[in-house]
Image (tube, rainbow, N blue to C red):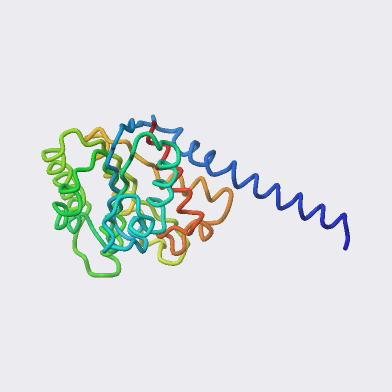
Amino acid sequence: MNTNNSRRNFLKTTALATLAAVNIPEIVSAAYKPAKLKKIALSNEDIILFQGDSITDMHRKRSDNDANSPAALGTSYPFLASAEMLYRYPEKKLSCYNKGVSGNKVYQLAERWQTDCLDLKPTVLSILVGVNDFWHTLVNGYTGTIKTYRDDYKALLDRTKQALPDVKLIIGEPYAVIGVKAVDDKWYPTFNEYRQAAREIADNFGAAFIPYQEVYDKAQKSAPGAYWTADGVHPTLAGAQLMAEAWLQTVKG
């Protein structure tokens, strides 16, 4: 056995692991710098609900309605963010739920909102929706427009605030990584309007805003887009951790 080679390999592996550990928080922090980061305070016995489409859903077990259930939280950022919160704040007795549904657009969230949101009475509500509101105009014959998205989203949040006036909102920015499978030049510049609309809606409703597009753009300085997302939209395991870190930076204990 070559001791020098073994040592070099060990040092290389250790350096890469250290780089990975350091880079994700730094990537996320850099993405937040252009805009003022709003944080929401977690309270004792908060009920935290993740809502959205397949990016949030990610194979969750829909028949499992228990809080803090690994199977019910799926395999993406809601699971990872929930695990970290429960680890950090055991004294707060948080309850975390994931009710994302693959393929959903805003109007489809609205169709199930009573059961999958309002009846749960969340005190913290995180929503990431919008990619299908655009993507499905390219592939599924959906005829909605940016106006449809904006109007539907505002109506959904108006309804939410009427039922839950004290709910703390977190709005995720729709994102896409160009050049990775499903995402190509046909997405632009129109898709950017959906990103901007989500940001404006977050501002209008006093929500914390997660700049996921900037997070993914910054991450590609460390590794290519296909490392972070399998098809330009759905996160890989590394991408899920990236998103969880971005989500966690919007809350404080």
Q: Residue at x 46, y 39 (%)?
A: 31
Instruction: Please state if 195 lies on the left or on the right of 234 as rendered.
Output: left
Q: Residue at x 33, y 33 (%)?
A: 42
Residue at 33% across, 45% down: 172
> Can you say whether 5 is above or below 164 in the image?
below
Q: Where is the C terminus found, in terms of image quarters?
A: top left
Q: Position of residue 35 (x, y in %)?
A: 40, 32
Task: Locate residue 70, reporting x and y percent.
Answer: 39, 56
Quadrant location of residue 95?
A: top left
Residue 219, given in percent of the width and then of the height, sits at 52, 48
Q: Nearer the viewer, residue 100 or 155?
A: 100
Q: Is residue 202 above or below residue 147?
A: above
Tell which residue pokes out farthest to the bottom in this image.
Answer: 140
Residue 175 at x, y percent in the picture: 38, 52
Image quarter in which the N terminus is found = bottom right
Residue positioned 21% across, 65% down in the render: 142
Total residue callouts: 0
Please indicate whether residue 78 sits to the left or right of residue 225 in the image: left
Write down the quadrant of residue 58 in the picture: bottom left
